[in-house]
């Protein structure tokens, strides 16, 4: 429940990003503000101030004011409000993580159940595909696909996805994680095939579709539910890594990974530009993992039995 409360809080503040940007901070977090000014302690100051270190060349963005109405976490090297971008970036990171996890679990459930139930050539072909994808390191495969598709986009039949679309990282991340969900589900279905109620359903003449829908799916659904929050955390981390490398979310859109990338050059002068999205990633990933563990315990009869002893 604690993980769920923290996750709901993070989602809520990210969904309120437009309200904060337009009604509280009165900024546009997606356009450069090189000549902008703001009020600090009753004085109007430049958002980008002259550098006072070394030879004094260049400019340094203002640091955190800790005032929600004026650059709460300071500005980045383009003069944009870091806190407003943090909220907008969270919307994209959570959207990509949730959508790719949902797509991954859906495809993995279909393939894993089909491989485990039908067996034979279907199981052999799907298992070899899983093995091939499994053989590649996750991030290496995701980076390779992103580099290729960012130049050409995704064109499969009637499906056309442009290089800058958020659908592209969703499809890429979902694809690389399918075997990690499908293989455990296949194993669960293989064990279910030997159970008496499945044999009874087969003996009564029930069709394969009815057995899959009425017998197999209800017994596999708890495992899918447990996998979902865990996959959201993994997918969100993968998206942040890709965006940090500039092959995930593309400008002018933002994500927590792109904001960390923006803050690399400011680590020694304005560390909050990179620290804030990193902290948000940690908080969200931990809450999702705790939520996944709670869901596993809730759906595991053995865990309930151990807790009652």
Image (cartoon, rainbow, N blue to C red):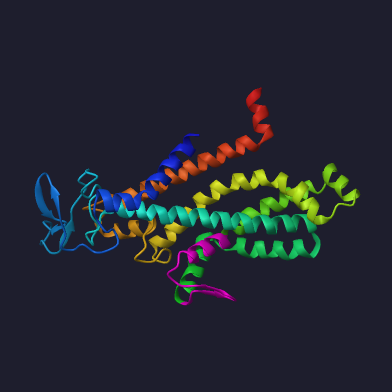
Residue extending furthest toward the top? 309
Q: In this rendering, is residue 136 above or below 82? A: below
Q: Is residue 159 magenta?
A: yes
Q: Is residue 244 found left or right of 262 in the rendered image?
A: right
Decide which of 28, 244 is in the foreground and name it: 28
Observer able to see residue 237: no
Count of numbered circles on the image: 0
The quadrant in which residue 28 appears is bottom left
Decide which of 304, 159 is in the foreground and name it: 159
Residue extending furthest toward the left? 43
The quadrant in which residue 112 appears is bottom right
Decide which of 174, 184 is in the foreground and name it: 174
Q: Residue at x 81, y 49 (%)?
A: 193
Q: Is residue 172 found left or right of 40 in the rendered image?
A: right
Q: Position of residue 72 (x, y in %)?
A: 24, 47
Observer able to see residue 20: yes
Q: In this rendering, is residue 106 above or below 290? A: below
Q: Is residue 104 magenta?
A: no
The residue stretch that appears in magenta: 152-176
Decide which of 116, 105 is in the foreground and name it: 105
Q: In this rendering, is residue 283 above or below 168? A: above
The C terminus lies in quadrant: top right
Q: Is residue 159 found left or right of 129 in the rendered image?
A: left
Q: Residue at x 33, y 57 (%)?
A: 259
Q: Is residue 18 found left or right of 173 in the rendered image?
A: left
Q: Residue at x 45, y 37 (%)?
A: 5
Q: Position of residue 39 (x, y in %)?
A: 13, 49
């Amino acid at each position: 429940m604690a993980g769920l409360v923290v996750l709901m809080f993070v989602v809520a503040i990210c969904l309120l990003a437009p309200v904060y940007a337009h009604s509280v901070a009165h900024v546009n977090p997606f356009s450069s503000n090189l000549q902008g000014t703001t009020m600090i302690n009753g004085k109007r100051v430049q958002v980008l101030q002259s550098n006072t270190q070394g030879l004094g060349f260049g400019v340094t963005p203002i640091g955190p004011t800790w005032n929600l109405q004026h650059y709460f976490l300071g500005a980045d090297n383009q003069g944009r409000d870091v806190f407003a971008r943090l909220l907008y970036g969270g919307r994209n990171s959570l959207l990509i993580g949730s959508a790719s996890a949902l797509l991954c679990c859906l495809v993995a459930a279909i393939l894993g159940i089909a491989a485990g139930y039908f067996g034979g050539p279907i199981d052999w072909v799907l298992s070899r595909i899983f093995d091939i994808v499994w053989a590649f390191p996750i991030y290496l495969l995701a980076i390779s696909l992103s580099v290729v598709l960012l130049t050409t986009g995704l064109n499969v039949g009637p499906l056309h996805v442009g290089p800058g679309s958020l659908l592209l990282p969703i499809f890429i991340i979902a694809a690389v994680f399918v075997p990690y969900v499908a293989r455990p589900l296949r194993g669960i279905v293989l064990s279910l095939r030997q159970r008496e109620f499945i044999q009874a359903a087969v003996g009564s003449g029930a069709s394969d579709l009815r057995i899959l829908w009425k017998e197999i799916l209800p017994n596999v659904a708890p495992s899918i539910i447990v996998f979902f929050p865990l996959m959201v955390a993994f997918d969100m981390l993968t998206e942040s890594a890709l965006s940090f490398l500039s092959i995930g979310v593309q400008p002018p859109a933002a994500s927590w990974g792109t904001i960390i990338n923006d803050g690399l050059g400011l680590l020694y002068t304005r560390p909050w530009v990179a620290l804030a999205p990193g902290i948000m990633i940690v908080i969200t990933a931990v809450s999702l993992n705790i939520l996944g563990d709670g869901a596993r315990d809730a759906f595991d009869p053995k865990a309930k039995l151990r807790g009652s002893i």
